[in-house]
């Protein structure tokens, strides 16, 4: 049996940028152990597994070491794969049934728009003593939501020059930590980087789900509901955000770099 397989770069309009996700389109639900083994074999930050079900698609996400509850870039990649195969041919929303509930994605001109829940951070005081030490930063804000810690620092250069102690960060009891700063250019509103060594990813190149937290945080600080975000990892990515009620709409490009078959 062979399974259609894609490798797609999300949140970029150029190959070999953004965040790369594998997408496997199954005819039936996969077994968790098998999906985890495939994700480890792919060795990308996320591998998405989806199969058709009534009124949409079941969707699960795996890092090389664990299953996660919410992933933006692999959802964007899964949507791109469905269009590539011709499973979806119109611009109506696609519904994905996930561990974070029903999520939708829509093709909008040359981008894909994700409709995700907001995941705001609450201030935490004091933060874990090793957290700021592992990052080597002085924080202007420390908060957390159910997934991650959020750290704001004073300048873009502090975010750009981060060199974390990943062994220390593995002690986090949450998925990971995002570090962010207000932009110093007109190209975007804020920048960030994301680290999750405990989930098998030292640095995630572009993290859609982190912007479910970063979006409302900066929307409140900057007094605006439409934002442009840059994740300034080595691969770099660009996200276009819009806040509405308790939802965040995350738009981004996607580029397919590999298509083939996975032999099960």
Image (cartoon, grey):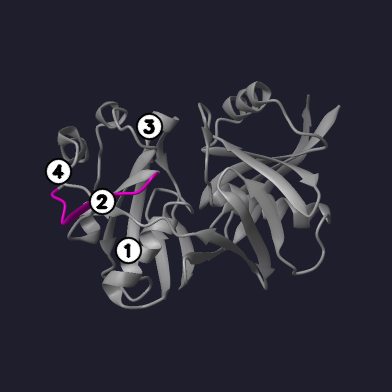
Percent position (x, y) of residue 169?
Answer: 28, 32
- Please tell me which residue is depicted at 57% across the width and 53% down the height of the picture: 10
Q: Of marks 1 and 4, which one's residue comes earlier in the chain?
A: 4
Crowdedness near tag 2: few (<14), some (14–19) or many (≥20) residues, C-alpha within 10 Å = some
Q: Quadrant of residue 5?
A: top right
> Mark 3 and mark 4 in contact (Cβ < 8 Å)?
no
Image position of 9 with respect to 191: above or below: above
Residue on which disc 2 sits: 143
Q: CA distance from mark 2 to mark 3?
A: 19 Å
26 or 163, nearer to the observer:
26
66 or 160, nearer to the observer:
66
> Mark 2 and mark 4 in contact (Cβ < 8 Å)?
no
- Report the mark closest to the observer, 1 or 4: 4
Q: Is residue 184 left or right of 36 when viewed as pictured?
A: left
**Label ID, residue 197:** 3
Can residue 16 be seen in this snapshot? no
Dot 4: what SS? loop
Q: Of marks 1 and 2, which one's residue comes earlier in the chain?
A: 2
């Amino acid at each position: 049996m062979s399974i259609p397989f894609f490798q797609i770069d999300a949140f970029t309009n150029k190959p070999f940028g953004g965040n790369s996700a594998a997408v496997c389109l199954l005819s039936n639900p996969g077994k968790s152990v098998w999906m985890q083994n495939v994700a480890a074999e792919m060795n990308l930050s996320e591998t998405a597994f989806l199969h058709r079900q009534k009124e949409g698609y079941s969707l699960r996400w795996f890092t090389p070491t664990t299953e996660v509850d919410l992933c933006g870039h692999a959802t964007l990649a899964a949507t791109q794969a469905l269009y590539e195969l011709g499973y979806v041919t119109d611009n109506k929303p696609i519904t994905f049934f996930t561990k974070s509930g029903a999520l939708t994605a829509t093709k909008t001109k040359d981008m894909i728009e994700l409709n995700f829940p907001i995941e705001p951070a609450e201030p935490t005081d004091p933060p874990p003593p090793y957290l700021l030490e592992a990052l080597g930063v002085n924080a202007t804000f420390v908060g957390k939501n159910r997934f991650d810690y959020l750290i704001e620092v004073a300048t873009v250069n502090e975010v750009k020059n981060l060199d974390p102690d990943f062994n220390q960060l593995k002690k986090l009891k949450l998925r990971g930590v995002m570090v962010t700063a207000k932009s110093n250019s007109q190209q975007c509103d804020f920048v960030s980087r994301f680290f999750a060594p405990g989930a098998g990813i030292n640095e995630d190149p572009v993290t859609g789900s982190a912007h479910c937290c970063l979006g409302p945080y900066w929307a409140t600080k900057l007094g605006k509901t439409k934002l442009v975000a840059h994740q300034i990892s080595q691969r770099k990515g660009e996200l276009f955000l819009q806040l509405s009620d308790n939802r965040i709409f995350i738009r981004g490009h996607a580029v397919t770099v590999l298509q083939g078959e996975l032999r099960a």
